[in-house]
Image (cartoon, grey):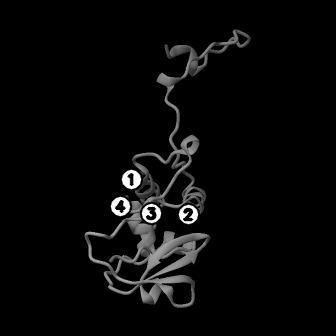
């Protein structure tokens, strides 16, 4: 089993409530946290992966990992510094950046604020129609898009 915080492989695992999100963590990451239960190891065939549900009206972009990485690299900061900025473990930020973990809403908001980016899907101009008001003498970008 892989710890959802640090990524370490371990047979011992606990379910800990961290920032109102239940995560399966190793003994080291569970120490000092609110542990809701200890999970007895099962064989791999029966193991299920946690599912993160994102509201349909605020879906996360398919390329959220690369958006985070590009913004971090643009700011010229290593993963460790970004993790410190948002009070998260480096392993969590790395897993989100590599798209091995979908960030919970609280983490998503911290990343968006720290990096100045949006991780949500944005509507494309193809899906929108524009009807100019005709009040302005200056042309807008929307008037050039069919």
Q: Circle 4 sits in a helix, a strand or a loop, which is it?
A: loop
Rendered position, 109 above or below 47 = above
Mark 3 element type: loop
**Left or right of 51 in this view: 110:** right
Q: CA distance from mark 3 to mark 2?
A: 21 Å
Q: Is residue 78 visible?
A: no
Residue 113 lies in quadrant: bottom right
Compared to residue 83, the image places residue 75 above or below, namely above
Marks 4 and 2, the one that precedes in the sequence: 4
Residue position for label 2: 107
Q: How many marks?
A: 4
Marks 2 and 4: in contact by CB < 8 Å? no
Quarter assignment of residue 110: bottom right
Rounded to the nearest angstrom, the CA distance separating label 1 from label 4 is 8 Å
Where in the figure is residue 35, as x and y percent of width and height?
55, 84
Residue 98, disc: 4
- Is 92 in front, or is 45? 45
């Amino acid at each position: 089993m892989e710890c959802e915080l640090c990524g370490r492989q371990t047979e011992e695992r606990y379910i800990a409530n961290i920032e109102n999100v239940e995560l399966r963590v190793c003994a080291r990451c569970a120490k000092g946290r609110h542990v809701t239960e200890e999970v007895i190891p099962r064989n791999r065939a029966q193991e299920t992966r946690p599912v993160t549900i994102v509201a349909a009206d605020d879906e996360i972009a398919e390329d959220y990992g690369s958006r985070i990485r590009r913004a971090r690299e643009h700011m010229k900061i290593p993963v460790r510094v970004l993790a410190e900025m948002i009070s998260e473990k480096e392993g969590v930020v790395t897993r989100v950046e590599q798209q091995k973990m979908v960030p919970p809403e609280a983490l998503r908001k911290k990343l968006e604020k720290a990096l100045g980016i949006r991780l949500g899907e944005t509507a494309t101009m193809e899906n929108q129609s524009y009807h100019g008001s005709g009040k302005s003498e200056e042309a807008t970008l929307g008037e050039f898009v069919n």
